Image (spheres, helix red, strand yellow):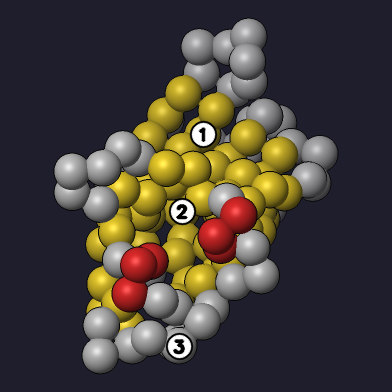
Amino acid sequence: VQLVESGGGLAQPGGSLRLSCAVSMEITHIYAMRWYRQVPGKERELVATSLYNGRTSYLDSTKGRFKVSRDNAKNTVDLQIDSLKPEDTAVYYCNAFGGPDSNFLFWGQGTQVTVSA
C-alpha cells in the first residue's frame, strides 16, 4: 500500500493550504485515515482522523482551523488548513490504520508545511 502526500509548501500566517493524500488501494473500509505532523526534535502528533463511518476528530489546538475529508471514490484524504499559524510548521504525514485489532498500518513520506511571513 502506498500513500503519497502533496500540497505542502510555504504559506503566510493567516493563509490556507490543502494537503492531499493519495492511497493506492480502496479506502472505503479502512478503519481510520489520519494526518500527523512532526517537527524536529519532537514526537509525531496526531492532528486529524477520518473514520470509516464518517466521524472525524481533531487535535484540540487545530479545531476550527483543520478539516479532514475522505473521498472514497478517489481514494484520497485531504486536510484543509485555514488560518495558518507559524506553529503549524511541520512535516505532515498521512497514515492508514486498520483498527485496534489490526496490523494494517501504512505511512506516507510526508509533505513539508512552512508558515512564515
What amino acid is at disc 3?
Answer: Gly
Classify residue 12 by image quadrant.
bottom left
Q: Nearer the viewer, mark 3 or mark 1?
A: 3
Q: Residues within 10 Å of mark 2 (few under 14, many from 20)?
A: many
Res 14 label? 3
Classify residue 111 by image quadrant.
bottom left
In this rendering, does residue 49 appear at all? yes
The residue that mark 1 highlights is: 96
Query: Of all residues shown, which one is farthest toward the left?
Result: 41
Vertical position of residue 62 compared to residue 31: above or below: below
Dot 2 or dot 3: first in sequence order is 3
Q: Residues within 10 Å of mark 3 (few under 14, many from 20)?
A: some
- CB of mark 3 within 8 Å of CB of mark 1? no
Q: Which SS class for mark 2?
A: strand
Question: In whole angstroms, how far apart are the C-alphas of marks 3 and 1?
Answer: 29 Å
Q: Nearer the viewer, mark 2 or mark 3?
A: 3
Res 21 label? 2
